[in-house]
Image (cartoon, rainbow, N blue to C red):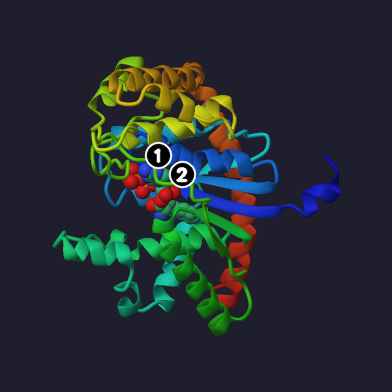
């Protein structure tokens, strides 16, 4: 690749919180799009492990989740020769910058964040990490001067908080941070779960992305079918993205569903077969990578070295502007 085409590439940063197994809704809504974006952008994919500590407070579980996200991303095609994959906790500058942001942000401002308001509405005991969560996310983003921050709709407010925080810092200490654009991921359509609600780990209605054949069959047989029309939409809406991933974006399932109108068992069996055809190879690739965890750790280490160089240079500028360097 020529230097010219590298220079015209935009910088993209996104993060995933390592809190559990991904499902096919996560894949079509976010993960697959990251794979597609890595050819035309300089990408940073961060494993937001310190963000996970607000809820995951068990050593083994956190370690497994961190390696799990790395395996998931490598298995679906994130290519470490093109993209930088790294652990947030490996770059201490994230914590340092988030403290500075804490100092220029007010409590009433953070109290307006959706995540805090939701937790408060549920009367949850909220830890300080959850309250400050948007400041760490602002640091994650602003250290790398990204042009684009692709996130799901639920994270848009956090990117807006990041923009406000960058503007505030720039006003107080002088122009330092680029104001990033939140790029809401292409609306892949909400993938329904087995109960017809949005597929979500909070609803216990998921089909895991790396599910075993048994898990796939069990989940599909659980899908609630609506008998009012002749197309079981809960089956069809899961089937279509899988079918398109296997046969191309324009392939249509309509003929199959019309020919088998009302035959829910036949249609569910067809969905099981396509899920197995789609998930099987991903699962095998992940299992092969899992056999060589040392090489996965080496990828994270090499990613952290590259990320560190960028974050360190930005933080040197920040320290000077704030006045802690004499
Ligand atoms: P969950 O609801 O399972 O907790 P997250 O909120 O962690 O999922 O979502 C991670 C990413 O996956 C977000 O970008 C989100 O928009 C996307 N996503 C999650 N569920 C779905 C779904 N059912 N359909 C499409 N995209 C989804
Ligand atoms: N807060 C995001 C989530 O819960 C994860 C995240 C952390 C992130 N830091 C980020 C996303 C920086 C984009 C950019 O999904």
Asked if residue 211 is positioned above or below residue 142 in the image, the reply reads: above
Relative depth, front residue between 12 and 107: 12
Asked if the residue under mark 1 is in contact with the one under mark 2, i.e. CB atoms within 8 Å, the reply is: yes
**Which residue is at the front of the view, 235 or 39?**
235
Query: Would residue 49 be visible to someone looking at this image?
Result: no
Please state which of residues 141 and 273 is positioned toward the viewer in this rendering.
273
Q: How crowded is mark 1: few (under 14 residues within 10 Å), some or many (20 or more)?
A: many
Circle 2 crowding by C-alpha within 10 Å: few under 14, some 14–19, many from 20: many
| Residue that carries the numbered disc 1 in the rendered image | 25
Residue at position x 67%, y 38% in the image? 82
- Left/right placement of residue 144 relative to residue 218 reads right
The answer to whether the residue bearing label 1 lies less than 8 angstroms from the nearest atom of ligand 1 is: yes
Indicate yes or no: mark 2 CB to ligand 1 under 8 Å.
yes
**SS for callout 2:** helix
Label disc, if present, on residue 274 of the rendered structure: none
* Image quadrant in which you'd find residue 158: bottom left
In the picture, which quadrant includes the N terminus? Answer: top right
Residue under the image location 27 percent in, 65 percent down: 116
Q: Mark 2 points at which residue?
A: 29
């Amino acid at each position: 690749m020529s230097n010219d085409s590298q220079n015209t590439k935009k910088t993209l940063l996104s993060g995933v919180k390592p809190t559990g197994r991904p499902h096919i809704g996560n894949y079509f809504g976010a993960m697959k799009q990251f794979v597609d974006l890595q050819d035309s952008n300089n990408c940073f994919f961060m494993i937001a492990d310190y963000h996970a500590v607000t809820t995951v407070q068990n050593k083994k579980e956190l370690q497994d989740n961190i390696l799990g996200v790395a395996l998931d991303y490598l298995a679906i095609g994130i290519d470490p020769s093109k993209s930088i994959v790294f652990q947030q906790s490996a770059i201490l500058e994230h914590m340092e910058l988030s403290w500075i942001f804490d100092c220029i942000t007010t409590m009433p401002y953070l109290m307006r964040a959706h995540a805090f308001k939701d937790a408060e509405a549920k009367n949850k005991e909220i830890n300080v990490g959850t309250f400050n969560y948007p400041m760490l996310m602002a640091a994650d983003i602003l250290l790398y001067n990204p042009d684009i921050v692709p996130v799901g709709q639920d994270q848009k407010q956090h990117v807006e908080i990041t923009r406000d925080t960058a503007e505030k810092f720039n006003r107080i200490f002088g122009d330092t941070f680029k104001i990033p654009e939140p790029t809401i991921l292409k609306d892949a359509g909400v993938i329904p779960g087995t109960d017809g609600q949005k597929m979500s780990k909070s609803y216990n209605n998921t089909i895991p992305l790396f599910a075993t054949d048994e898990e796939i069959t069990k989940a599909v047989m659980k899908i609630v079918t609506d008998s009012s029309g002749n197309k079981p939409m809960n089956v069809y809406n899961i089937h279509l993205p899988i079918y398109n991933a296997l046969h191309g974006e324009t392939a249509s399932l309509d003929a199959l569903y019309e020919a088998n109108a009302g035959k829910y068992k036949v249609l569910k069996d067809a969905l099981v077969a396509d899920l197995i055809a789609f998930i099987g190879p991903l699962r095998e690739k992940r299992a092969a990578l899992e056999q060589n965890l040392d090489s996965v750790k080496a990828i994270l280490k090499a990613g952290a070295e590259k990320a560190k160089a960028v974050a360190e240079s930005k933080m040197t500028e920040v320290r000077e502007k704030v006045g802690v360097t004499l």
